[in-house]
Each structure stands twice: as structure tokens, then as C-alpha cells.
Image (cartoon, helix red, strand yellow):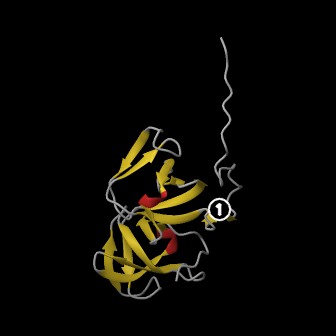
């Protein structure tokens, strides 16, 4: 029996996770921060087991604008994680910088103002994809658009935005 050792460059950002809390941000070769959130550009996107077309497709996403977290880069490939924790590689052309998020847990209330007593505009079901309009760093609320409605939702009710992250 002969064992072979294959050496390959470690993708930028492929590191052991930091302790609990928000991970530290680093800068990738693209000049963009890691980790960061993006969204799927197309209605069908292949997630591969490695950074290249020679790697098998592990998953096919069929939800345009689904938020993804970029956790590593290798040339034109991005290692991403979805809201359920599934990780794999997607070509950069299949990703968009548009900020979206997904509603977590249970039905949530979209409010007219960033206040839990403000007028309710709509109810958002779990797993609904929303567009982030603005998220101030303070206050815990984000202004979003969803299904023709625009209003405020608590940041903790969304996946696709980091604690304290500012989106303008």
C-alpha cells in the first residue's frame, strides 16, 4: 500500500473559526472583507465540493437572491455558507453584492418604524428573502423591502447581516 500526499494552496480565509461571537474580518486577495455577505445572482447556482469545475456539484440552489456568506476565496471561486450551515464553492460570477437576508424562525412583523410598538405593515413567513435597504450599526433594526412592502424588522430576525454591521 502506497500513501500519497497531495499539497494544494490553502484558500484565503480557510481557517479555524474564532471563538464565540462575530468572527474577525480579514481582507481577501479580491480586496473585499472576509467573511462578508452576498446573494445568488441566478435562479440556478451550482455549489461544488472544491474551487473548480473539476469538482463535483454537491448542491444546486434554485432561489435567486438567496443570501450567502463568503468565508474564503481561491482565484475566481468563493467558499460560501448558507443560512443552514451548508458550505461549498461557487464561481464569483454567480454571486452578487446586492444585500439580501432571509427571515429566521417564525412569522415576523414588518413595522412602519424601528420600534416594536409601531404599526404593523406585513407579516413575513420564515425563509422569505428580503432586500436590505439600510441597517444602522445601532438600534438593532434594519429597513428592508419584501413583496412590495418596505419597513423595519429586528436585525436578530434576519440571517444575512452581522451584529453591528452597517449597510447604507
Residue 59 occupies quadrant: top left
Which residue carries the number 1 mark? 28
SS type, badge 1: loop
Q: Work out whether residue 25 or residue 106 is closer to the camera in this orientation and state it.
A: 25
Q: Give how far across and how far down residue 122 sits, in percent.
A: 31, 78
Instruction: Name above or below for residue 28 compared with residue 124.
Output: above
Q: Looking at the image, how many numbered discs can be counted on the residues? A: 1
Q: Work out whether residue 153 or residue 77 is closer to the camera in this orientation and state it.
A: 77
Q: Image check: 137 left or right of 160?
A: right
Q: Are there few (<14), some (14-19), or many (20+) residues within 10 Å of tag 1?
A: some
- In the orientation shown, which residue stands out farthest toward the top? 1
Q: Image point 66% across, 54% down: which residue?
A: 12
Q: Give how far across and how far down residue 61 sits, in percent.
A: 36, 52
Q: Image point 48% across, 60% down: which residue?
A: 68
The answer to whether any part of residue 104 appears in the image is no
Q: Image point 47% across, 85% down: which residue?
A: 115
Instruction: Name above or below for residue 41 compared with residue 7.
Output: below
The answer to whether any part of residue 160 appears in the image is yes
Amino acid at each position: 500500500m502506497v500513501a500519497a500526499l497531495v499539497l494544494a494552496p490553502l484558500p484565503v480565509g480557510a481557517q479555524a473559526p474564532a471563538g464565540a461571537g462575530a468572527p474577525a474580518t480579514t481582507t481577501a486577495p479580491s480586496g473585499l472583507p472576509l467573511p462578508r455577505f452576498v446573494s445568488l445572482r441566478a435562479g440556478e447556482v451550482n455549489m461544488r465540493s472544491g474551487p473548480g469545475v473539476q469538482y463535483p456539484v454537491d448542491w444546486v440552489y434554485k432561489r435567486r437572491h438567496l443570501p450567502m456568506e463568503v468565508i474564503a476565496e481561491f482565484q475566481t471561486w468563493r467558499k460560501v455558507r448558507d443560512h443552514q450551515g451548508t458550505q461549498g464553492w461557487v464561481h464569483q460570477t454567480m454571486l452578487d453584492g446586492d444585500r439580501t437576508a432571509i427571515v429566521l424562525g417564525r412569522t415576523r412583523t414588518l413595522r412602519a418604524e424601528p420600534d416594536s410598538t409601531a404599526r404593523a405593515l406585513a407579516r413575513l413567513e420564515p425563509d422569505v428573502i428580503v432586500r436590505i435597504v439600510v441597517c444602522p450599526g445601532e438600534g438593532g433594526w434594519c429597513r428592508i423591502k419584501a413583496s412590495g412592502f418596505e419597513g423595519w424588522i429586528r436585525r436578530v430576525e434576519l440571517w444575512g447581516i452581522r451584529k453591528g454591521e452597517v449597510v447604507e
